[in-house]
Image: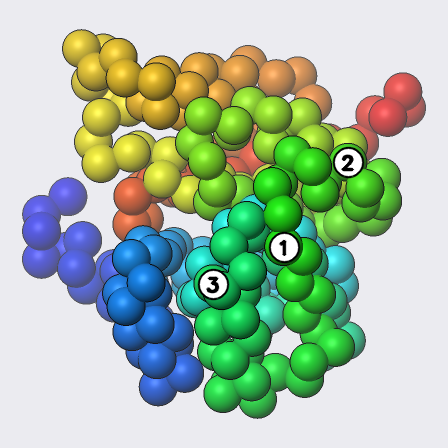
């Protein structure tokens, strides 16, 4: 894809002042949020799923959360987990600025792999993962437990700055993301796609099975 086409696609759905403010907060604290193209894809997924319950791993300053909340049902609740309480405070400010009712965003401060096991099995429509890349395989395991049949899991940075496609790149994070992609692609109970938006968005639908 030519750079001009990529830029056109990334900016196809424009961001408003609330999202711009959330991005500014992210820059101030050194957080790298999902791009606008990936955010639009998340909103689309939440809308198609008619999502009422969503889990987000990696709150940041609320950029991805805003996209998700805008795609969810009006009564939907986002449960968002981040190890940085200060980031979550900024995210709550972003949600408030956008007119999101406080009860629609449940922020939980803590390590994802400590928090996720406490959430309800089969209760969620969508799980979005943008935390520690080295933990992506563990996030997938938790997501498969948390999702209802037909639910979707999504992983940001699935191309990891063009490193995943280069077999010569063998650092820990790149290998973890590459292995995750292989696991998802080969999983019998998942229908997957790699969306070339932003830094890559890997999505997979949990299929229904009698055993599940």
Q: Position of residue 199 (x, y in %)?
A: 29, 43
Residue, disc 2: 117
* Residue 46 seen by the camera: yes
Q: Residue at x 89, y 20 (%)?
A: 211
Question: In the displayed structure, would residue 185 be above or below residue 40?
Answer: above
Q: Say what secondary structure mark 2 lies in.
A: helix
User: Can you say which quadrant of the picture contains the N terminus?
Assistant: top left
Q: Position of residue 81 (x, y in %)?
A: 61, 52
Mark drawn on residue 136: none
Q: Residue at x 47, y 45 (%)?
A: 130
Residue, disc 1: 109
Q: Position of residue 135 (x, y in %)?
A: 52, 28
The numbered mark, 2 or 3, whose residue comes first in the sequence reads: 3
**Label 2: how many Cα within 10 Å (few below 14, some 14–19, many 20+):** few
**Label 1: how many Cα within 10 Å (few below 14, some 14–19, many 20+):** some
The numbered mark, 1 or 2, whose residue comes first in the sequence reads: 1
* Display coloring: rainbow
Q: Position of residue 28 (x, y in %)?
A: 28, 68
Q: Say what secondary structure mark 3 lies in.
A: helix
Residue, disc 3: 87
- Nearer the observer: mark 2 or 3; the answer is 3
- Nearer the observer: mark 1 or 2; the answer is 1
Q: Say what secondary structure mark 1 lies in.
A: strand
Picture quadrant of residue 149: top right
Contact, CB < 8 Å: mark 1 with mark 2? no
């Amino acid at each position: 894809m030519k750079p001009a086409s990529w830029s056109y696609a990334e900016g196809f759905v424009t961001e408003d002042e609330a999202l711009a403010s959330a991005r500014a907060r992210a820059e101030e604290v050194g957080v790298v949020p999902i791009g606008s193209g990936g955010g639009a894809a998340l909103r689309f997924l939440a809308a198609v799923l008619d999502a009422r319950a969503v889990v987000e791993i990696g709150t940041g300053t609320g950029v991805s959360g805003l996209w998700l909340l805008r795609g969810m049902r009006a009564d939907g609740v986002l449960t968002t987990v981040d190890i940085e309480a200060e980031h979550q405070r900024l995210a709550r400010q972003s949600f408030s600025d956008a007119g999101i009712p406080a009860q629609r965003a449940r922020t939980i401060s803590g390590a994802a792999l400590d928090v996720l096991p406490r959430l309800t099995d089969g209760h969620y429509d969508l799980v979005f993962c943008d935390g520690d890349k080295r933990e992506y395989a563990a996030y997938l395991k938790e997501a498969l437990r948390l999702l209802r049949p037909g639910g979707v899991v999504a992983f940001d940075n699935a191309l990891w700055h063009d490193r995943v496609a280069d077999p010569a790149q063998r650092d820990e994070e790149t290998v973890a993301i590459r292995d995750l992609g292989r696991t998802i692609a080969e999983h019998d109970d998942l229908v997957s796609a790699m969306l070339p938006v932003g830094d890559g968005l890997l999505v997979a639908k949990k299929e229904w099975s009698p055993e599940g």
